[in-house]
Amino acid sequence: MASKSQSSAKPTTAAPRGRLSLTGREQESSMQQRMTWDQICEHPECQGRWVALYGCEYDQETGRAREGAVVDVDDDLASLCSRVQQSHLKNCAILFCRTRSN
């Protein structure tokens, strides 16, 4: 795994497609950084994958996710849900982040 830049609010961990966990000790500060849904969806590690968000806020008019703190990302929904269930963060929203072409 590549190290994360302290000044960036976006997840920058290099991981093979399949799983990106931002819940590890070295990623704790990233977990606390809130990002808009647009910022999350622009990040290549999140595009076309399931994203677990802590403290997710929704737009009152559209009901769509507006922002949250990314805690984990995975191609496999069941694996992501299992890790979130085992973590200390129990109130996460899990949303699919479409690719730009979708």
Image: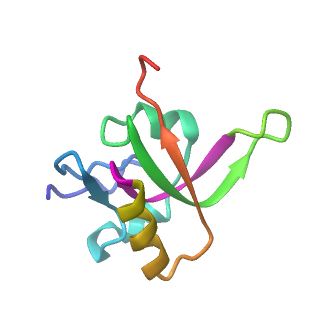
Range shown magenta: 65-76
Residue at (62, 47) in percent of width and height: 67
The picture places residue 42, in percent across and down from the top left corner, at 42, 31
Quarter holding the N terminus is bottom left
Kindly identify the residue that appears in the image at 41 percent across and 71 percent down. 82
Magenta residue check for 70: yes
Whether residue 48 sits left or right of residue 18 in the image: it is right
Is residue 13 or residue 3 the one in the foreground?
Answer: 13
State the scheme by which the image is colored: rainbow
In the displayed structure, does residue 64 sit left or right of residue 33?
right
Residue 77: image location, x then y, percent: 42, 55
Furthest residue toward top: 101
Compare residues 14 and 90 and report the one nearer the observer: 90
Residue nearer the viewer, 14 or 64: 64
Residue 52 x %, y %: 49, 58
Report the side of 86 relative to 35 (left or right).
left
Q: Is residue 41 above or below residue 68?
A: above
Above or below, 69 against 14 in this view is below
Q: Position of residue 75 (x, y in %)?
A: 33, 48
Residue at position x 77%, y 40% in the image: 63
Q: Main secondary structure of the magenta part?
A: strand
Looking at the image, residue 52 lies above or below residue 85? above
Q: Which residue is found at the position 66% from the left and 43% from the top?
A: 65
Q: Is residue 14 magenta?
A: no
Q: Is residue 34 left or right of residue 28?
A: right
